[in-house]
Image (tube, rainbow, N blue to C red):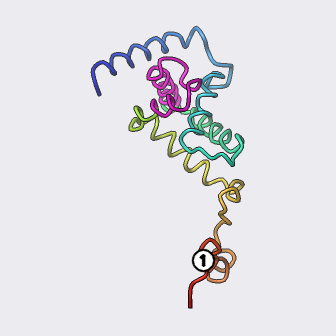
Amino acid sequence: MKRRNFLAGSSVLTIAALALPIYPSRAGEPFTDGQTAALLRLVKDIFPHDALSDDPYQAVVGQLTGAAADPNMLTLLRDGLASLDAVAEGAWHERTEVDRVSALKEIQSTPFFLTVRVMTLFGLYGNPAIWPAFGYEGASYEQGGYLFRGFDDLDWLPEPLS
């Protein structure tokens, strides 16, 4: 990490930490509306799917919010969102897609990004309600395996020549 990035990030995090008592989140909710919007934008930018509505992504944000009951996770998420805003020099989630992706590339190896990516991966693709949107029929073990259910479903390939 470059000294300049460290100092810039440290100063923004310090200012954010000092501002938290002045602008507390709503009672019982760990994140402000802006932070929740940034989390939603973040999970949508990490795993974008035009065919999906916001509902599955909102479910992932709900899981992240639930995980924020742990003080360490809450700190990680808040600090990570603040670092995104610092990299974007403003409200990260309100920037253009190009600017958002550029900022994400800068933080892609941080514990914050890696944690959100893994939680989104399992929260999104582990949701059976959205499997049909991806063409996944689910596990076939309960139906006797793939030998009699989908083994030779190759409708996306041309018929073989004999």
Q: Which residues are magenta?
A: 74-103
Q: Is residue 36 above or below residue 20?
A: below
Nearest to the observer: residue 130 or residue 50: 50
Residue 106 painted magenta: no
**Where in the figure is residue 97, as x and y percent of width and height?**
55, 32
Q: Amino acid at mark 1?
A: Pro
**Where in the figure is residue 110, as x and y percent of width and height?**
40, 35
- Residue at 66% x, 22% y is 33
- Residue picked out by circle 1: 158
For mark 1, give the secondary structure: loop
Q: Is residue 146 above or below residue 97?
A: below
Q: Quadrant of residue 2?
A: top left
Q: Quadrant of the N terminus?
A: top left
| 155 relative position to 113: left or right | right
- Residue at 55% x, 20% y is 91
Q: Quadrant of residue 153?
A: bottom right
| 149 relative position to 86: left or right | right
Principal secondary structure, stretch drawn in magenta: helix
Nearest to the observer: residue 128 or residue 136: 136
Q: Residue furthest bottom?
A: 162
- Residue at 60% x, 48% y is 123
- Residue at 43% x, 15% y is 12
Residue 89 painted magenta: yes
Total marks placed: 1
Is the residue marked by circle 1 packed among few (<14), some (14-19), or many (20+) residues within 10 Å?
few
**Where in the figure is residue 162, as x and y percent of width and height?**
56, 91
Q: Is residue 159 above or below residue 117?
A: below
Q: Is residue 20 above or below residue 34?
A: above
Q: Residue furthest front?
A: 161
| 50 relative position to 42: left or right | right
